[in-house]
Image (tube, rainbow, N blue to C red):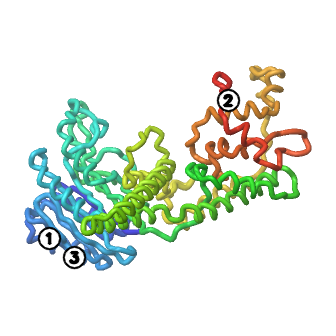
Amino acid sequence: MISTIIWNVRGKNTQAVIERLKNLKNIHHVSMLAILEPFSDNTNINIFKSMLAMDHAVSNPNGKIWLFWINDITCSVIENDEQQITCELNHTKASAKYIKTFVYAKCKDYLRRPLWDRLLHIADTRDTTPWCTVGDFNVIKETDEKLGGIPYNMRKSIDFIGVIEACGLIDLAFNVPKFTWSNQRGVNFRIWKRLDRAMANDKWLHVMPHTSVTHLPSVGSDHYPLLMEMYAKTDEGIKYFKFLNVWTSQPSFHETVTQYWTRPIESNPMWTFHQKLKRLASTLSVWSKEQFGDIYAKVREYEERVKVMEENLIHNNTEENRAQLHSTNAEYIKCMKLEDSILKYKTQLQWFKERDGNSKYFHALIRGRRRRLFIHKILKDNDEWVQGYEQIAQVACEYFQNIFTGNQELIDELPMNCIPRMVSQEHNERMKAMPTIQELKEVVYSMNPNSTAGPDGMNVFFSRSAGISLKRIVGSGSGFLQWPDDPQILLTYLSDPPPQGESA
């Protein structure tokens, strides 16, 4: 883990601030420290480097941003001005170099425009490098990032929001409290805002998707310190099967499903159904690699081929070159549509319109969701926070182990007799009755076909296309599941939606 603290101290000459910085550095094992608004001459920076036990230090021209780092980091300043310092960094725990822009923005919106221009320039020239910008931007992005005072005028934030979108930056997740600044006035006049934040580009989320930001208590300043913790990307874990809707467009899909589903398995119905799904998932994974290959690599490959053929056509304008270009363009468009279909499903965007393709945007959404789902730390029963992959896994295992191996305690059911019965025996029997195939079909066709897949990796679209999951037909009490061995028996029936008015 790589830890960085960014704090607008509003004057670091107070002893309380210095002691707080020392404590934060020791507690969180900080590798880099950014102090904003130190209110001190740049000639004093080396004195405070020694006081904070840091190895290196640098300042921007007007002394509003001071950076300190230890020897574990290799830092090279790319550019700096009155509102930012941009550095190329490499940490001993990181596999590649990355860029950080530390910001202390001006208070007036027109004075911040040179900063926005520099951010746009960095985004344009460093789009292939992991990049994060963090600090005090002195502006909010949404109305709910302010509490108290007069209503906020969002026109002040138009430039800021436009820069975020143009640079392709995504706001990194943070731990409470929500606001990072307060005017420290009386109860009736107090205002809170989220002026400090960290944002990263898509490449950063790919290399370090588990980056988190914690707002620490604001002791000694009207700003909250930001603790930024970065985890370098580890080896990929187990990749579980997930059905992709685009597979059904291939002519060989139904044939492949039928061929492998009809292979006999001798066991009880529930186990047989489980094994058939498991075998089919493995088969479809291999089949997909044969049919599609690496679709993302194919898109890049066809893009380069189109460029080369366009150049050839310019220098040698013949019908043969023109036909080859048109053919390659058609394949390129086909691959792009296939890529968009896959990315739309992975991002679960139900509202996205056709022809509004932007694969970079999709990738950012996917990584943003994975980042939000990542567990950075966990709280034990004794109010102790635990961090790290192995430590969190151990705590989780111990927790569930205690649940499943705890002492059995009988539940007193006597109070239950005092609760009136709202469900009659007739209703209870109807709810326990086994559903018919028509009822199952109505349920499946009433569900969103692009909804998230279940634990087996099969989604509703698969149920509609192949009809296999609808073969969970309950018959006698001898087995939990019964269905025809041949999936083609129900394919014709299930391929058409129920008549209007029949669906649930």
Image coordinates for residue 357, horizontal then vertical, percent = 39, 48
Cα separation between marks 3 and 2: 71 Å
Q: Which residue is mark 3?
A: 56
Q: Please report contact status of discs 1 and 2: CB closer than 8 Å, yes or no.
A: no
Image coordinates for residue 209, horizontal then vertical, percent = 42, 61
Disc sitting over residue 498 in the figure = 2
Image coordinates for residue 463, horizontal then vertical, percent = 67, 43
Q: Which residue shows up at 75% across the image and 58% down it?
A: 260
Residue 140 as seen in the image, left or right of residue 261:
left
**Which quadrant would the N terminus be assigned to in this image?**
bottom left
Looking at the image, is 252 positioned above or below residue 75?
above
Q: Classify mark 3: helix, strand or loop.
A: strand
Q: Which residue shows up at 83% across the image and 22% down it?
A: 425
Q: Amino acid at mark 2?
A: Pro
Q: Amino acid at mark 1?
A: Ile
Disc sitting over residue 45 in the figure = 1
Q: Which residue shows up at 72% across the image and 42% down it?
A: 491
Cα separation between marks 3 and 1: 10 Å
Image coordinates for residue 80, horizontal then vertical, percent = 14, 65
Nearer-the-camera pick, 343 or 221: 343
Q: Classify mark 2: helix, strand or loop.
A: loop
Looking at the image, is 482 positioned above or below residue 102?
above
